[in-house]
Image: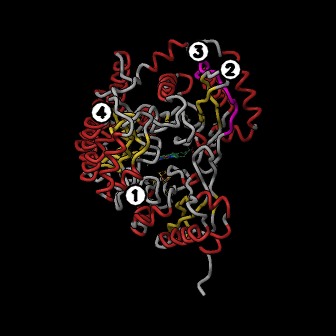
Amino acid sequence: MYRYDEQDHKLVRERVAQFRGQTERYLAGELKEEEFLPLRLQNGLYVQRLAPMLRIAVPYGLMNSAQVRRLAHITRKYDKGYAHFTTRQNVQLNWPNLEDVPDILAELAEVEMHAVQTSGNCIRNTTTDQFAGVARDELVDPRPYCELIRQWSTFHPEFAFLPRKFKIAVCGADQDRAAIRAHDIGVQIVKNDKGEVGFQVLVGGGLGRTPILGVAIRDFLPETHLLSYLEAIVRVYNQLGRRDNKFKARIKILVKAMGAEEFARRVEAEWEQIKDGADELTPEAIRWAKRFFPEPEYKSIANGHGEAVLRDHAGEDKAFARWLERNTFPHRVNGYQAVTLSTKPTGIPPGDVTDRQLEAIADLADKYSFGEIRVTHEQNVVLADVEQEKLFELWQEARKNGFATPNIGTLTDMICCPGGDYCSLANAKSIPVAEAIQRKFDDLDYLYDIGDLDLNISGCMNACGHHHIGHIGILGVDKKGEEFYQVQLGGSSNEKASLGKVLGPSFSRDEMPNTIGKILDVFVENRHPDELFIDTYNRIGLQPFKERVYAKAS
Ligand code: HEM
Ligand code: SF4
């Protein structure tokens, strides 16, 4: 992973000192609320219902064990002993005291972490595939490009006050696990006929109150031009994006209003001016970035050896076999597998981990996966490089620590925003809905029979829980001061991304588990053998679901 040099350390330390001064002046009444607001936002600090919320950047979801141990310590010392993983691969603290935040940032800086640009109208953390570098369907490892984008975008003086927040995601594999079409810019790594690396560039995706999927404005951008082209896009947006209306300020609105073709034309014109300038990525610069992601020291393992060990264990232990099937992912290197630690046991808010669990994650990473941890878009944790021979042992330890719920990819592995329990923008609570659904559907055989299914929950139309792109999406709505939930079906976040359609009138919280049950019944009755929910939905459409869910009791 990227390691700070002396300059990086200095920058981050200075930023902490600066924020310490700003916080002290605010607390002393020398800075007004509205003066402090942009300063705290630039340092990841929101003020929420019950306490401030601090969002800490995890560049493209990657951390080392020392960083995770430091997070454990911070949650224990300054918070309530737990942290929350987000869909954009960051970490949030829900209960810090404002006066402690400079100390928290100082402790983070010691392990090369910060909260810069995790909120506010700037280019946010670049996200990517949690299986980057190990996935078998990967064309090119996206992490060096993410790092180059991170260095270009963080502290970019021109882009500190964009019309609105700006999110970039990069995918280097066939399967899009980073939801690039739901981002302001989505970058898909491709190769041309000559085998040269380049990028398909999508713009104008975003969720929130106006969900739109990104569209390609360039099918092959040569590798060397990545940063200059991104710069051209953000510059056009910065100049022409709306600043008069917060709800129309995202790039998606500009691209839609202008038309993708006209937007692309303007970007190309801007890019012509700068494409051979300072942002050019020379082969040397690319090699330099790649050096931070060397191949780990994999053992050379005989073909089939790891699988044979796994078969033996799986044959003896059904629970292990289930976990192996659901929570591990094929690795490109012989004898290795990637593991997803589930943060979704029933009754725990999706994405929440305790201080002790953070320490356990760090220990597991040191013992089994070269000391490296990844946060996933689905709010879980990945250990990417585990020897197959060690999986049984790892599973036993993961189980002791509450991470081995074998539900990855199933209905209960849901994405869920903090909702009304924490968030002041919420229309409704999300976490209790997640829990009620998890409790109703806790039979693993049923979940496996249903197969892969993305259920995403947001507590309001801001869509932090990505409800528009869940196969089943749930949105908290306010009806005359009461909390209700609207259901959407047919969304999807991968390379065939689609936006869900509203099923009909909303439901009370108590009705939600049964409503989901009815939707699943329609699926089970209509599916072709082994068909996934989303494929059945695409084949039969919304109507059969609607009829069942809103049928009058006879
Ligand atoms: C509790 C504090 C939070 C607040 C106040 C908050 C606020 C918001 C707002 C206002 C938007 C809509 C912005 C727009 O469309 O321009 C948004 C979008 C989003 N938030 Fe949050 N959020 C919070 C927590 C989270 C968490 C915990 C996650 C991840 C689980 C998250 C992930 C996202 C994502 C992925 C979007 C994307 C929508 C898009 O890009 O169009 N947020 N958030
Ligand atoms: S979707 Fe709404 S309720 Fe949920 S975290 Fe985002 S702003 Fe808050």
Mark 1 or mark 3: name the one nearer the start of the chain: 3
Mark 4 or mark 2: name the one nearer the start of the chain: 2
- Secondary structure type for disc 1: helix
In three-dimensional space, the C-alpha distance between marks 2 and 1, rounded to whole angstroms, equals 45 Å
Tell me what residue is drawn at x 36 percent, y 24 percent.
Answer: 12
Would you name the residue on which mark 3 appears? 280
In x, y percent, where is residue 105?
32, 32
Q: Quadrant of residue 306?
A: top left
In three-dimensional space, the C-alpha distance between marks 2 and 3, rounded to whole angstroms, equals 11 Å
In three-dimensional space, the C-alpha distance between marks 4 and 3, rounded to whole angstroms, equals 33 Å
Amino acid type of disc 1?
Answer: Asp
| Label ID, residue 421 | 1
In x, y percent, where is residue 76?
23, 44
Amino acid type of disc 2?
Answer: Trp
Disc 2 or disc 1, which is closer to the eye? 2
In x, y percent, where is residue 203?
65, 36
- In the depicted view, which residue is nearer to us: 105 or 363? 363
